[in-house]
Amino acid sequence: MTAPLPTAPPQVLLAHHLKALKLPTILREYDKQAKLCAAEGVDHTRFLLRLVELELIERDPFAGRPPRYVRAMEYDYQFTNFTERRQTGNWWKRELKGAYFPPISLRPQAAPEKP
C-alpha cells in the first residue's frame, strides 16, 4: 500500500527561501494571491507579477523612483558535493536557464503625444 500524495505544496521550504531573500510581502501574500488567481483563472506569470508588484509597492526600495520594467530569470539549482561545499562554502550551485518571463512593465506607459 502506498501513501497518498500530498495535496499541498511544502510550505517550510518556500517560507525559508522567501525569508532568506528578504521578501516579507510575498511571504505574507502568496497563499492569498494564489487562491485569488486560481479563482480568476490568472496564469502563473501574472500571479508572480502580482506578488512582485505588491512587494515593490510596500517596500519601495527605489526611493520613489520605481523601475519601468521587471523580469524574472529561471535557474536550475543543484546541491554542491562535499568537495565543492568545502572549497566554496556554497550549499547550492545554479545554472541560468533563461528568462522565466521577459521584461514587462508594471504599469502601462502613456502613449507619446503626436507632434
Image (cartoon, helix red, strand yellow):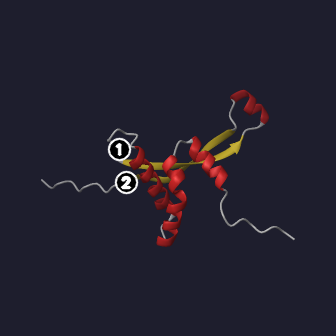
**What residue is drawn where x is 32% and y is 41%?**
65
Residue 100's x, y, as percent? 52, 53
Q: Residues within 10 Å of mark 1 (few under 14, many from 20)?
A: few
| Residue sitting at x 77%, y 37% | 81
Which quadrant is the N terminus positioned in? bottom right
- Secondary structure beneath disc 1? loop
Question: Along the line of sight, which residue is nearer the eye, 113 or 2?
Answer: 2
Counting residues from the start of the chain, the first of labels 1 and 2 encountered is: 1
- Check whether the beta carbons of the residues at disc 1 and disc 2 lie within 8 A of each other: yes
Left or right relative to 73: residue 1: right
Mark 1: which amino acid? Pro
Q: Read off the residue under disc 2.
A: 106
- When the figure is inspected, residue 43 is found, relative to residue 100, above or below; the finding is below
Q: Quick check: 45 above or below 55?
A: below
Residue 54 left/right relative to 16: left
Q: Which residue lies furthest to the front in this view?
A: 28
Rendering coords of residue 47 (x, y %): 49, 60
What percent of the width, then of the height, locates residue 14? 62, 51
Residue 66 shows which numbered tag?
A: 1
Answer left or right for 53 relative to 83: left
In the image, farthest residue toward the top: 87
Mark-to-mark CA distance, 1 and 2? 10 Å
Report the amino acid beneath label 2: Leu
Observer-nearest of 115 and 69: 69
Quarter of the view holding residue 67: top left
